[in-house]
């Protein structure tokens, strides 16, 4: 992703995750998008395909303040934004956490970080930034 795009999307309304091992991300609301970022390069992924959702891989998450992470943008409702280059188990957690937000959005529910973590953990993730895995 071009640097100019990163700067632009950092001001977007986003919901992100944070993981201490990577970097704490943010949950910022800074207004709606004038134009959603392009998702032309989104790809299918085994974890998201059952939800008719694709992944946009980015060098740094468009929504994690330049850090590694992921996010779900309601403005691109069938895409999850994920940083490239994370360890596999962390990447799985990020994807599943953001899928949790996608499902919340589709159900008309408020975004709930702990619930997104619980969704991820229920589907095999070993992490929980907002709610630690239940022993
Ligand atoms: Zn989240």
Image (spheres, rainbow, N blue to C red):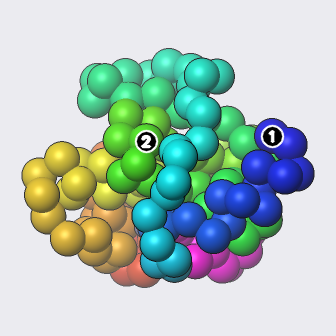
Give, as a single range, the part of the protein colored magenta.
16-26
Q: Mark 2 points at which residue?
A: 76
Mark 2 / mark 1, whichever is N-terminal: 1
Tag 2–tag 1 contact (CB < 8 Å): no
Q: Visible in this render: residue 3?
A: yes
- The residue carrying mark 2 has its beta carbon less than 8 Å from ligand 1: no
- Pinpoint residue 118: horizontal percent, then vertical percent: 29, 65
Residue 17 counted in the magenta span = yes
Q: Distance between the residues labelled 2 and 1?
A: 16 Å
- Pinpoint residue 6: horizontal percent, then vertical percent: 77, 55
> Pointer 1: residues within 10 angstroms few (<14), some, or many (20+)?
few
Which residue sits at x=78%, y=62%? 7
Q: Name the residue under label 1.
A: 1
Residue 66 counted in the magenta span = no
Q: In the figure, is residue 8 to the left or right of 96?
A: right
Q: In the figure, is residue 63 to the left or right of 134?
A: right
């Amino acid at each position: 992703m071009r640097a100019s795009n990163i700067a632009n999307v950092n001001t977007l309304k986003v919901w992100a995750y944070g993981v201490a091992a990577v970097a704490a991300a943010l949950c910022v609301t800074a207004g709606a998008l004038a134009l959603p970022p392009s998702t032309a390069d989104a790809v299918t992924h085994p974890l998201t395909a059952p939800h008719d959702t694709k992944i946009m891989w980015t060098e740094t998450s468009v929504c994690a303040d330049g850090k590694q992470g992921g996010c779900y943008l309601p403005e691109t409702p069938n895409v999850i934004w994920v940083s490239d280059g994370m360890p596999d188990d962390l990447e799985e957690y990020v994807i599943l956490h953001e899928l949790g937000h996608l499902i919340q959005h589709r159900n008309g529910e408020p975004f709930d970080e702990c619930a997104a973590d619980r969704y991820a953990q229920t589907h095999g993730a070993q992490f929980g930034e907002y709610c630690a895995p239940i022993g």
